[in-house]
Image (spheres, rainbow, N blue to C red):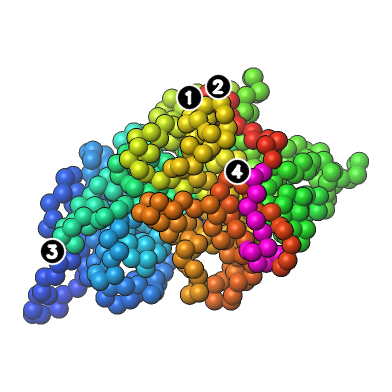
């Protein structure tokens, strides 16, 4: 659900014009791939690109620059009669590092993530990406069978299709494609295309994705342990059905009465109050505009309660206080009090809709990502009707087996020598940071039994988690967030050894497990404007603790084991991990 991809819409076809009477172009190793026979696959184009740039076939188009000469292959995969999975494979001609890189999608995808492909080939990988098979259903990253936001300016800016679509309702095979099959088949076919082009297989294979891409990543580790040697999973939407219920719970609460609605700018008010109470108490610095470990913050929104009988933008009325408590708690089964999905962390409050949190939701006509429920209940389903007791099981019965990457049995992947790096932002307002912690803690419990230190050591031999203070969903936010490999283009002076994707390749190929990486915050989030601050991101459960000196320099911090007393709210067993 990466916001940098949400303005892209479904790709349109490219038209190649050949002058009448002109001699046909000579075949090349790239164009010869157009005739490559692959199972359930139609290669739709194979074109050389030696220009150093690429104009994306999106509305609006984006020009990607600084590219090596590469071969661009497009294909459609049809594993079932109702499937139409689009993929692209980009193959560097002279700069290939002998590695294969699968990349993930965002939200409901429906488009190709061209920025991920470009970043992959800039780093020397043969890279591939998929629309997850949802483009044929008219889906975009934020919308897939949702008609309620037609005409909403913000929804249009975030890629709402021009006409209502049916999404995946009535298409069980496309749901399987979206959940796990598209990425696996993209990987298999992509490797075959790599072998045909280079006349050799890739020496190692990696996958990198965030949000839905993180879900893709964990599906690969769980279901297809032979596909990749190393997997980078950011802010994974792995507990998909229950994650969507967490967002829906907040929407229902903020729209239950007119008084519960959080007004524009009030999330900034709340965030300022959170920082005033908690910043610096968790190993960070008193001047930080973010929390290092929000679990240490016990902020109660009732501290912003309006004086009796008053209401206004600079305080919270009783209904708004109740709504914010749901924001922090998450979705709960009202019949038995069981937690369905944890809520958002303190410090994740923001009034910027680009963060994909409540500020975006409050500006739409219906909940973002509510399309998923229409796949189950039909296109006329309305958010008001969802019952958090009765309907949870109905959604899970239809979708959980195909969408929820909740298995913690990674023995086949680890047994093959596979390495997994997870990462997430502590200030993520879309996928609560606690979700990633819960998955990692469940891995530890699976692999080590009751003795935590032994279990942690065993788990960290193949899997590590990095929590980034002040980072929103996949990137951005008030904290340093440039460290995730294919998430953000590095600055010219960027040291690649601090890149998580590079750390993953070193772990797989050299056995050097990362204990920390350096995250960078650029001035105005623009690399060309220089570095504002750097900070280590530590292998969980360690956190970066300020030890003195310039707070904008990474060397002023050290990674320290966090206290065991932190509370990690996790779903009830039937909804977890």
User: Where is mark 3, residue-wise?
Assistant: 32
Instruction: Give the mark nearest the N terminus, 2 or 4.
Output: 2
Res 541 label: 4
Res 394 label: 1
Instruction: Give the mark nearest the N terminus, 1 or 4.
Output: 1
Residue 572: image location, x then y, percent: 58, 25
Q: Nearer the viewer, mark 4 or mark 3?
A: 4
Q: CA distance from mark 4 to mark 3?
A: 50 Å
Q: Report the span colored magenta.
A: 551-562
Query: In this rendering, would 535 be left or right of 459?
Result: right
Q: CA distance from mark 3 to mark 2?
A: 55 Å
Q: Nearer the viewer, mark 2 or mark 4?
A: 4
Residue 498: image location, x then y, percent: 50, 62
Q: Are marks 1 and 2 in contact (CB under 8 Å)?
A: yes
**Image mark count:** 4
Q: CA distance from mark 1 to mark 3?
A: 49 Å
Q: Are marks 4 and 3 in contact (CB under 8 Å)?
A: no
Determine whether 234 is above or below 30 in the image: above
Q: Residue furthest top?
A: 336
Res 390 label: 2
What SS does tag 4 mark? loop
Residue 316: image location, x then y, percent: 81, 45
């Amino acid at each position: 659900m990466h916001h940098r991809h949400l303005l892209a819409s479904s790709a349109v076809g490219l038209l190649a014009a050949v002058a009448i009477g002109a001699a046909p172009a000579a075949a090349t190793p790239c164009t010869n791939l157009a005739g490559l026979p692959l199972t359930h696959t139609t290669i739709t184009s194979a074109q050389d690109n030696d220009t150093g740039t690429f104009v994306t076939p999106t509305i609006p188009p984006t020009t990607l620059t600084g590219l090596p000469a590469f071969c661009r292959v497009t294909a459609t995969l049809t594993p079932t009669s109702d499937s139409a999975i689009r993929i692209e494979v980009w193959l560097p001609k002279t700069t290939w590092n002998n590695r294969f890189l699968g990349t993930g999608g965002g939200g409901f995808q429906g488009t190709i993530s061209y920025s991920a492909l470009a970043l992959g080939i800039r780093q020397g990988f043969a890279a591939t990406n998929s629309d997850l098979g949802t483009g044929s259903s008219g889906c975009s990253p934020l919308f897939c069978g949702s008609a309620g936001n037609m005409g909403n300016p913000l929804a249009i800016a975030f890629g709402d299709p021009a006409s209502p679509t049916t999404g995946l309702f009535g298409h069980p095979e496309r749901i399987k494609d979206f959940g796990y099959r598209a990425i696996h088949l993209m990987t298999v076919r992509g490797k075959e295309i790599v072998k045909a082009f280079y006349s050799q297989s890739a020496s190692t294979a990696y996958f990198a994705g965030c949000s839905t891409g993180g879900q893709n990543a964990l599906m690969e580790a769980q279901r297809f342990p032979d596909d990749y040697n190393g997997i980078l999973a950011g802010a994974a939407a792995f507990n998909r059905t229950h994650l969507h219920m967490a967002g829906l719970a907040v929407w229902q609460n903020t729209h239950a009465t007119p008084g519960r609605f959080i007004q524009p700018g009030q999330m900034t008010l709340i965030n300022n109050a959170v920082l005033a109470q908690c910043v610096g108490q968790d190993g960070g610095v008193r001047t930080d505009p973010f929390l290092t470990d929000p679990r240490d913050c016990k902020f109660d929104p009732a501290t912003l309660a309006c004086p009796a009988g008053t209401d206004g933008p600079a305080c919270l009325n009783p209904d708004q206080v109740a709504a914010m408590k749901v924001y922090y708690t998450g979705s709960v089964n009202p019949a038995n009090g069981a937690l369905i999905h944890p809520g958002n962390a303190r410090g994740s409050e923001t009034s910027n809709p680009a963060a994909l949190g409540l500020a975006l939701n409050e500006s739409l006509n219906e909940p973002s990502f509510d399309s998923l429920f229409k796949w189950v209940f039909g296109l006329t389903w309305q958010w008001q009707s969802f019952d958090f007791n009765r309907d949870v099981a109905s959604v899970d019965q239809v979708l959980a087996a195909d969408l929820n990457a909740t298995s913690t049995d990674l023995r086949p992947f680890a047994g093959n020598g596979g390495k997994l790096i997870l990462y997430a932002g502590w200030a993520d307002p879309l996928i609560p940071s606690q979700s990633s912690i819960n998955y990692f803690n469940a891995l530890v419990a699976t692999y080590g039994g009751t003795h935590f230190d032994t279990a942690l050591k065993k788990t960290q031999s193949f899997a590590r988690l990095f929590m980034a203070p002040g980072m929103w969903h996949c990137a951005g936010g008030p904290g340093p967030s440039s460290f995730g490999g294919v998430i953000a283009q590095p600055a010219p002076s960027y040291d690649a050894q601090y890149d998580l994707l590079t750390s993953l390749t070193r772990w797989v190929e050299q056995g050097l497990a990362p204990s920390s990486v350096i995250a960078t915050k650029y001035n105005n989030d623009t690399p060309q404007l220089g570095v504002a601050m750097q900070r280590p991101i530590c292998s969980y459960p360690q956190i970066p603790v300020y030890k003195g000196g310039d707070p904008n320099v990474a060397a002023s911090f050290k990674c320290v084991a966090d206290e065991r007393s932190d509370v990690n709210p996790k779903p009830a067993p039937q909804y977890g991990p």
